[in-house]
Image (cartoon, helix red, strand yellow):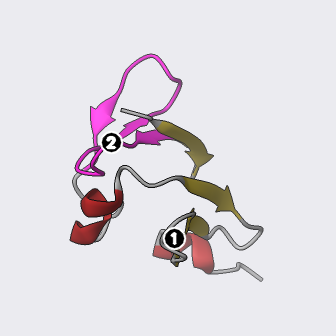
Amino acid sequence: KQPSILYYNDKLYVFGGSFDDFYASPEGLTWSSVKQKMLFPEHFGEASDHPYSIAIDKDNFIWIIWGQKGEVWRGRINKLGFKIN
């Protein structure tokens, strides 16, 4: 229900509905369930009927902005936060 797709960490990711499932694909043809590193807080499922927007910033944070709830969440895969000098 109402899936969102984003390109992040060289993969496509899809999620939505009650935020119980998160899927990844390297090319968009084959998909696998993600059970580690990309998990949502449990209460996201309660807000699944509310509108939200997603953005990825230059520092590799994924931002989720909830329309009716007024909540803003961010997260990222930790390895994407380190800069090699």
Horizontally, is 79 left or right of 39 in the view?
A: right
Residue under the point 45% across and 16% down: 29
Q: Is residue 42 above or below residue 1?
A: below
Task: Inspect the image, locate mark 2, and give the three-letter code of the amino acid beneath it.
Answer: Gly
Residue under the point 30% across and 51% down: 19
Residue 43 location, quadrant = bottom left
Task: Inspect the image, locate mark 1, and give the three-letter code of the amino acid beneath it.
Answer: Arg
CA distance separating discs 1 and 2: 21 Å
Q: For mark 2, what is the residue?
A: 17
Give the crowd class for mark 2: few <14, some 14-19, many >=20 residues within 10 Å.
some
24 falls in the magenta region: yes
82 falls in the magenta region: no
Horizontally, is 77 left or right of 83 in the view?
A: left
Residue under the point 34% across and 60% down: 47
Q: For mark 1, what is the residue?
A: 76
Secondary element at image label 1 = loop
Secondary element at image label 2 = loop
Q: Quadrant of the C terminus?
A: bottom right
Residue under the point 26% across and 45% down: 21
Residue 2 rendering spot, x and y as whole percentages: 44, 35
Residue 72 rendering spot, x and y as whole percentages: 55, 77
How many numbered markers are drawn?
2
Residue 3 location, quadrant = top left
Q: What residue span does the magenta drawing correspond to?
A: 13-34
Mark 1 vs mark 2, foreground winner is 2
Asked whether 77 or 50 is in front, the reply is 50
Q: Is residue 85 above or below residue 3?
A: below
